[in-house]
Amino acid sequence: MKNQITAIIKKDILGIISNRRMFAILLVVPIVLTVFIPTMFILIVRFAPAEAADFQKLLAMLPLPEQAEASSESILRLVLNNILPIFFMMIPIMAASVMAACSFVGEKEKKTLETLLYCPLSLKQIFRAKVLAAFLLSMLVSAISFVVMFVVLETEICLLAGFFLLPDAKWLLVLVLVAPAISLIAITLIVKASAKAQSVEDAQQGAVFLIFPIIMLLVGQFTGVLLINAGILLALGIVCALLAVLLLKQSMSHFKYETLLK
Amino acid sequence: MNAVTLNTLSKIYTGGKKAVDSVTLSLSQGEVFGFLGPNGAGKTTTVKLLNGMLSPTEGALSVFGIDPSQNPEKVHALAGVVTEHAQMYDNLTGIQNLVFYGSVFGLSKTDSEKYGLELLRQLELTDAKDKKLAAYSTGMRQRLSLARALIHRPQILFLDEPTSGLDPESAQNVHSMIRRLAAENGITVFLCTHQLRYAQEVCTRYGLMAQGRLLAEGTLDALRCRICSGMTMKLKAKNLPADLVCQQTDDLTFKLPINSEEEIPQFVRKITDAGGQIYHISAELPSLEDIYFTLTESFKSPEADKEA
């Protein structure tokens, strides 16, 4: 049984890697979020003249500890530990949605789902394999993105500002709790949508709603209304994980061959 | 144990369409059963019901004693299915596809590769084994689907139009493979088709469907008995006696019903005595096609009368 499920997971992951369009999305979005945007922040902090009126306005908006003497180090620390983790959360959502949409609705679109359903695995086992494939890929993309981001950021900060900035505990919570939980929620939303959706794009729309809370969190960081800290992230992670498990169980119980092959 | 049993099986879709209407049928092991009927007769729906992809509205069914609506995965382990909608992965090669489906059926990689290559050889796909499926023609895909359905050495094959899109040579090849599988390996075959001539070559028993109903079932001889007891004498002749009751099909060709071959000499004598000339004579039993059209026509006419 384990080998059969592994075969499906392997096939799904290889399938998305060999699909150029999907692979490009998996590659470009993390690069923009973990390399392009952070580099922009560093360059602005380093090179924008501190006296410039616009920059002062931006600084005034940022919830810095001692605003009057905002050093580039404290600004960079805020960017690194408060703003980038939220940008980062979009990666698991994106990777999970792309993969889940491809592996559920993509199979339906290409008429390969029916063939898979004729195998001696129960519908639940097939779905579990597919959810697991999307989850594993999402975690893999997130982990690689994190490593790439830190290598690039530390190099840039060291070269331009002359010091190292270490990620704090919030990153650990994001990586081991929040990212897995929200990627599971994204997968579940896609799986739910996939029963009715006729195209990959249709199914992906379901997960777009997940981006809104993240944008709100981002606004919260810039305005200081809801600054993330380890406690908030922990609570958020636990709520998301519970929600993910609940949604997953509920969505799996609704599946029948008949509704899937419509 | 019967390979397949259908007992007053009905399926009504959500929209209210009755796709299968009280069908009762049983198949013994090793039989090649031709399930015949026009498009929309309910053949594909029956195959889906037999594989648990659809749940019956009424009646009961079983495949080797297993109820597919309760334990579909157990039926899948015993069955190989080829349908128009069961495609394979374009991004994988022929052999990669077979190895994948082999592993999903619990075979080891070496076993599925070895048997996969053997099936590709039998289906004349060896040259294309390393080509991606995207480069396969419709006929090649169809043959690969058959290889895929056989990869786990099933006990029963459900084939829904397995030779549609195949050229005559490939179709012939597939049919002789089906015959061989049934004869040598004892595989039961449930073959849905509307290619009646091919069906007559391959099948041992038939079921004729129209609008969800099973019009008749049985061996070719049994079906012949059911629609008419005799045969048709075809002759090419000139100056036939005026009192000979026959149907002219062409300038010099005529058809007349006879009860058996024993009657032919009498007719020949009658024609030659009256000065007629015979160029060619043959006796024909009704083909599956004749039976099919007779049955579907007789099914349509009461319906048509009702509508009128």
Image (tube, coloured by chain):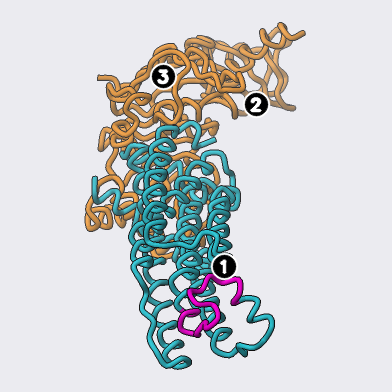
Chain colours: A cyan, B orange
**Disc 3 target residue:** B219
Q: Residues within 10 Å of mark 3 (few under 14, many from 20)?
A: some
Q: Earlier in the sequence, mark 2 or mark 3?
A: 3
Residue visible at 68% across and 80% down in the picture: A54
Question: As shown in the figure, which amino acid type bears the numbered disc 3?
Answer: Thr
**Disc 1 target residue:** A222
Label pair 1/2, CB-CB below 8 angstroms = no
Res. B138 in view: yes
Q: Residue B74 or A167: which is nearer the viewer?
A: A167
| Residue A57 colored in magenta in the image | no
Q: CA distance from mark 1 to mark 3?
A: 80 Å
Quarter assignment of residue A213? bottom right
Q: CA distance from mark 2 to mark 3?
A: 31 Å
Q: Of the numbered discs in the image, which one, if any, rests on residue A206?
A: none
Chain letter of disc 1? A
Label pair 1/3, CB-CB below 8 angstroms = no
Quarter assignment of residue B96? bottom left
Q: Residues within 10 Å of mark 1 (few under 14, many from 20)?
A: many
Percent from the top left, x then y, of residue B177?
A: 36, 43
Disc 3, SS: loop
Chain letter of disc 3? B
Q: Of the numbered discs in the image, which one, if any, rests on residue B236?
A: 2
Q: Is residue B53 above or below residue B10?
A: below
* Magenta residues (range): A59-76
Mark nearest the camera among 2 and 3 is 3
User: Do the residues indicated by labels 1 and 2 lie within the same chain of the protein?
Assistant: no
Chain letter of disc 2? B
Percent from the top left, x then y, of residue A131?
A: 39, 49
